[in-house]
Amino acid sequence: MCNSIDGEVSTNPGSSKCEFCGPGFRSDSTSNSCVKCLKSTYSNGGSDSCMPCNDNEISPNQAKFCTPCDPGTVPTAEGNECRNCPAGTHAPFGSSNCLACNLPGEFSAVKAPFCSKALPGSEPNLQRTESSPCPAGSKSESGLNCTICDGPGEFSPEGASVCSKALPGSRPNQQRTGPQFCPAGTKSESGEECAVCSGGGEYSHEGASSCNTALPGSFVNSLKTDTTFCPPGRYSSGAVITSCENCDGGFISGGGRGYCTICEAGKKSNEFHTECVTCPPGKFSGTASSECSSCEMGKFVGKSGQENCEFCPVNKKSMGDFNEVSGVGVGVGVGVGVGVGVGVGVGVGVGDEAREKPLQTN
């Protein structure tokens, strides 16, 4: 008699001739026949039952054995094939389910056997399907998430793991994506903000870490971006912001000077204070004069470039522009004669000596 437990069946009940149910089949005592194993089961043969596959294994109909799914795949609900795990999940070897990549910084592609870790300078997207570089202006030190670079002077390019610091003479742009030079007329000592050069005589060029001070003989333009030499007749001490000062009377400047030069005695400053002009004969000047003065009556200057007037010699007076003298003589004679008459003479002369001229009497 056939034993169905051992996988034997007989098409003729009571017959001693048995049929053996081989691999992929089981014996069925009800129908007294060999039946195929269904999906997700198997049979080595010689049994009245099909064994279920393990959770991570599959099998088609009439399977002799079960096949494990590859890493990154899991059995379908029918158990006859393996399906890929979607992006954002993973399945290690032996897993029957796709597991979510939900730890900090994790992501995965399709059919992933394990979760990947975002590199520094990047972060997983919301779906955890891939990692993306941190946008410019942010950072990710460990690949977990991107944080904004908002510290003093901080900025970053795309995909940065740390925030960079702007160098002196520059500052981060408004989006914190890169540095930019401070404009002329400003400075940045620490790479944070650009401050206006506000001190007297201060100016700067583009990208300055400190403000310069105008040198004597120059002045700062209204934009505080550069200096210009003072023109002739003017000067500056370096602390004037937008202009140079005029030289005082009796002082001159040749341009680009931090001081005015004094005119020496016998000279005066010209109208534009650019040179000292020698006083002509008949005029004089003291030190630091803006005009040449005329001599008083009774004094004269016979040469140019004189500091003082001279007194006229005895019996002489100044003439014209007080640059020459002339002589004056007066003589009076009295004569007494014996004889015909008495005569009195008055002489008037011009020159060094006076000449007498007798008066006529009746």
Image (cartoon, helix red, strand yellow):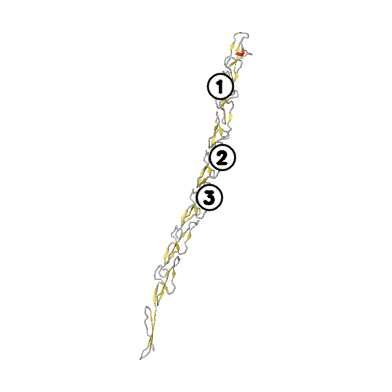
**Residue 331: x percent and y percent?**
39, 82
Q: Amino acid at mark 3?
A: Ala
Residue 147 lies in quadrant: top right
**Amino acid tagged 1:** Thr
| Local crowd size for mark 1, using a 10 Å CA cut-off: few (<14), some (14–19), many (≥20) | some
Amino acid carrying label 2: it is: Thr
Q: CA distance from mark 1 to mark 3?
A: 73 Å
- Earlier in the chain: of badge 3 and badge 2, it is 2
Whole-angstrom CA distance, mark 2 to mark 1, is 46 Å
Q: Which mark is residue 67?
A: 1
Residue furthest right as drawn: 30
Rendered image: mark on residue 147: 2
* Image quarter hosting the C terminus: bottom left
Left of 216 or right of it: where is 111?
Answer: right
List x then y, in percent, for residue 74.
57, 25
Q: Which residue is mark 3?
A: 195
